[in-house]
């Protein structure tokens, strides 16, 4: 075989295709045997990758993240082979690999690579099973939202909704949630609230604490933006509780960061502790986007507290991380906040440049 078994940092067996052995295989294996080796390699990494991806947001998620990062070259290689039509005996390998890598890249970035991989896999598999294709379209809609391409994200959600069968209620509920999120992003708060409330009712009926927590957090954001601060607090607290019960540390952390942001605005003494808890969760699962959320919330908290120098540094650090991740949406939010702060400091040239950047994104 051209694959050698070795122990990973976590002790699991993994196959490492070595360059020298690949060269040997190219020279000495027949086409059928080489294809069989590639298929075994793909099947192994898809099974392992899907298992690790499912564990990313849970306790011990950092271990799963390390495994995925360690094996990302193998996953990228099998994705490339699948997209090129070289894995005909491994069903839907390209879309499956793209979604495993999507789970990794949501935590680590860059968002642009995530989009490229999903674009290639979707383009190469127009006749994939409807549910799998709908899941990949939904993943790409998430990515497009981060890139600020809302119209394209909506188109992907519509295409996914047309494919998602009634036998996949969680997927359909997830689509309703994401439609509501996009409405909120565009300031359509009444539509967002109605859509999110319908999605939450569906999640509750399905007994899905994980998705219910995510939707509650989004409802909290809408209430917060509308100035309904009491309702926002209730939604955020419900989201923290539901996500904690479901073991979804990433979404629990996002809800905590939002709650800390609200409590900071209200002068609540618990804001600092909530920031610290959210940051600890980000570190526990290795989520850089959650670190970004916490950084942005802390910068806002410093800004409100009048520590403008520290807030300016915190906003700048957050902008650097947002750009590294390719999160254009959050980059725009931070740039807008920093521009306002620069105006307060009298740094007019910096403020103007930051407002221009914000307008270019939104």
Image (spheres, grey):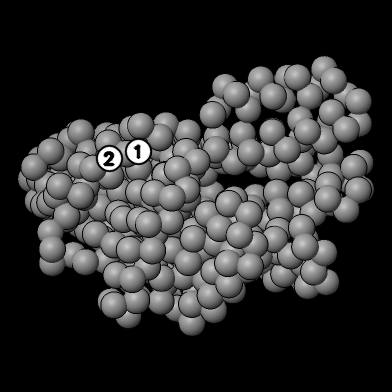
Tag on residue 88?
none
Q: Is mark 1 on a helix, strand or loop?
A: helix
**As displayed, is residue 348 above or below residue 34?**
above
Q: Can residue 255 be spotted in the picture? A: no
Which x, y percent locates residue 94? 23, 45
Say whether residue 234 is left or right of residue 74: right
Give the image quarter of residue 262: bottom right
Q: Is mark 2 on a helix, strand or loop?
A: helix
**Residue at x-position 17% and y-position 55%:** 164
Q: Can residue 238 be spotted in the picture? A: yes
**Residue at x-position 37% and y-position 68%:** 200
Q: Pointer 2: what residue?
A: 156
Q: Are marks 2 and 1 in contact (CB under 8 Å)?
A: yes
**Residue at x-position 28% and y-position 44%:** 157
18 or 143, which is in the foreground?
Answer: 143
Give the image quarter of residue 230: bottom right
Q: Residues within 10 Å of mark 2 (few under 14, many from 20)?
A: many
Which x, y percent locates residue 235? 54, 69
Which x, y percent locates residue 148? 47, 33
**Residue at x-position 91% and y-position 25%:** 346
Q: Pointer 1: what residue?
A: 153
Say whether residue 285 is left or right of residue 345: left
Q: Residues within 10 Å of mark 1 (few under 14, many from 20)?
A: many
Quarter containing the C terminus: top right
């Amino acid at each position: 075989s051209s694959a050698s078994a070795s122990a990973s940092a976590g002790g699991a067996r993994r196959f490492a295709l070595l360059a020298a052995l690949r060269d040997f295989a190219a020279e000495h294996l027949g086409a059928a045997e080489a294809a069989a080796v590639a298929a075994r390699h793909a099947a192994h990494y898809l099974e392992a990758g899907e298992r690790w991806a499912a564990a990313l947001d849970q306790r011990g998620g950092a271990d799963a993240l390390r495994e995925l990062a360690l094996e990302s070259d193998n996953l990228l290689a099998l994705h490339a082979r699948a997209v090129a039509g070289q894995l005909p005996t491994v069903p839907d390998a390209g879309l499956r690999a793209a979604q495993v890598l999507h789970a990794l890249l949501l935590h680590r970035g860059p968002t642009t690579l995530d989009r490229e991989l999903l674009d290639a896999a979707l383009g190469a598999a127009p006749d994939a099973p409807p549910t799998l294709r709908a899941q990949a379209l939904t993943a790409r809609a998430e990515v497009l939202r981060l890139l600020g391409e809302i119209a394209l994200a909506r188109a992907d959600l519509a295409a996914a909704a047309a494919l998602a069968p009634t036998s996949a209620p969680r997927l359909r509920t997830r689509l309703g949630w994401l439609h509501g999120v996009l409405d909120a992003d565009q300031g359509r708060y009444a539509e967002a609230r109605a859509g999110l409330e319908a999605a939450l009712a569906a999640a509750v009926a399905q007994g899905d604490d994980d998705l219910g927590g995510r939707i509650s957090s989004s409802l909290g954001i809408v209430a917060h933006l509308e100035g309904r601060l009491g309702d926002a607090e209730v939604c955020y607290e419900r989201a923290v509780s539901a996500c904690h019960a479901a073991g979804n540390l990433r979404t629990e952390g996002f809800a905590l960061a939002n709650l800390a942001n609200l409590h900071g605005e209200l002068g609540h003494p618990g804001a600092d502790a909530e920031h610290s808890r959210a940051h600890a969760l980000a570190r526990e699962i290795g989520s850089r986007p959650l670190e970004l959320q916490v950084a942005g919330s802390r910068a806002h908290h410093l800004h409100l507290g009048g520590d403008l120098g520290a807030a300016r540094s915190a906003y700048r650090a957050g902008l650097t991380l947002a750009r590294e991740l390719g999160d254009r949406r959050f980059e725009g939010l931070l740039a807008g906040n920093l521009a306002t702060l620069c105006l307060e400091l009298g740094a007019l040239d910096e403020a103007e440049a930051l407002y221009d950047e914000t307008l270019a994104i939104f």
